[in-house]
Image (tube, grey):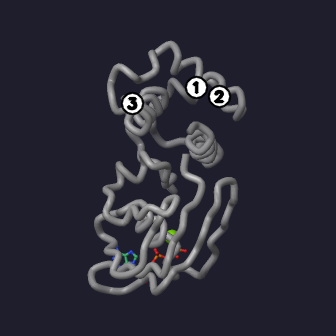
Amino acid sequence: MVTQLEIKDLHASIDGKEILKGVNLAVKQGEIHALMGPNGSGKSTLAHTLLGHPKYKVTRGDILLDGESIVTDTPDKRAKKGLFLAFQYPVAVPGVTMFSFLRAAYNAVHTTDKNEAPTLFDFREAVNEKVKLLGVDESFITRYLKKVSREERRSGRRFFSSHS
Ligand SMILES: Nc1ncnc2c1ncn2[C@@H]1O[C@H](COP(=O)(O)OP(=O)(O)OP(=O)(O)O)[C@@H](O)[C@H]1O
Ligand SMILES: [Mg+2]
């Protein structure tokens, strides 16, 4: 399990325009950091750069997980190492239930071999436990990924961050 994220003198550009100009930040396991700044100051740019969005180019500096650089890793590799970027506005996908989505996401991040994936029954048990823990309405899990209320959107995000 990763215990420290370190951002060192990070410079990043979009379409040749430098947005991040030397960001330094260390986040240890269990710490919560809130980044505050005016509109357009680069908060989203930093988040996208951390996850490896292809539009954002790192031109200098480094991003380290437990001392190991991840700047050349693709987003899926970064996710497997423990980074997750929540959706600000989750995408509506009619026909796909929250349960199937969570199961696919969980298996993609946590298993390399299909046979290692939790059985449907075990995964449902684990999800039910989290549903109770978070006080989410049970129907939330069987509904399609689609437009939901603000409060439900927040619950969705909490769900992801509690299910590691
Ligand atoms: N796709 C893009 N193409 C060109 N410039 C962009 C792009 N995305 C962001 N920028 C520019 O990068 C700068 C930082 O924007 P960013 O969205 O990271 O700021 P922010 O701090 O997240 O702002 P907000 O508080 O509005 O969410 C701005 O000058 C913005 O115009
Ligand atoms: Mg933003």
Whether residues under marks 2 and 1 lie with C-beta atoms below 8 angstroms apart, the answer is yes
Residue at screen point 42% across, 39% down: 109
Q: Quadrant of the N terminus?
A: top right
- Establish if 149 lies above or below 124: below
Quarter the C terminus occupies: top right
Q: Nearer the viewer, residue 53 or 89?
A: 53
Give neighbour class at mark 3: few <14, some 14-19, many 20+ (Cα, 10 Å): some
Which residue is label 3 attached to?
96
Q: Nearer the viewer, residue 83 or 151?
A: 83
Residue 119: image x %, image y %?
A: 45, 16
Residue picked out by circle 1: 127
Q: Callout 1, which amino acid? A: Val
Circle 2 sits in a helix, a strand or a loop, which is it?
A: helix
Residue sitting at 66 percent across and 65 percent down? 33
What residue occupies the far front of the structure in this picture?
Answer: 67
The foreground one among 37 and 54 is 54
Give the crowd class for mark 2: few <14, some 14-19, many >=20 residues within 10 Å: some
Crowdedness of circle 1 by 10 Å Cα count: few (<14), some, many (20+)? Answer: some
Residue at image position (57%, 30%) is 140
Q: Is residue 149 visible?
A: no
Q: Which mark is residue 131?
A: 2
The structure residue drawn at horizontal position 50% and vertical position 76%, both measured from the top left corner, is: 8
Is the Cβ of the residue at disc 3 closer than 8 Å to that at disc 1? no
Mark with earlier residue (2, 3):
3
Identify the mark nearer the N-term, 3 or 1. 3
Amino acid at the residue labelled 2: Val
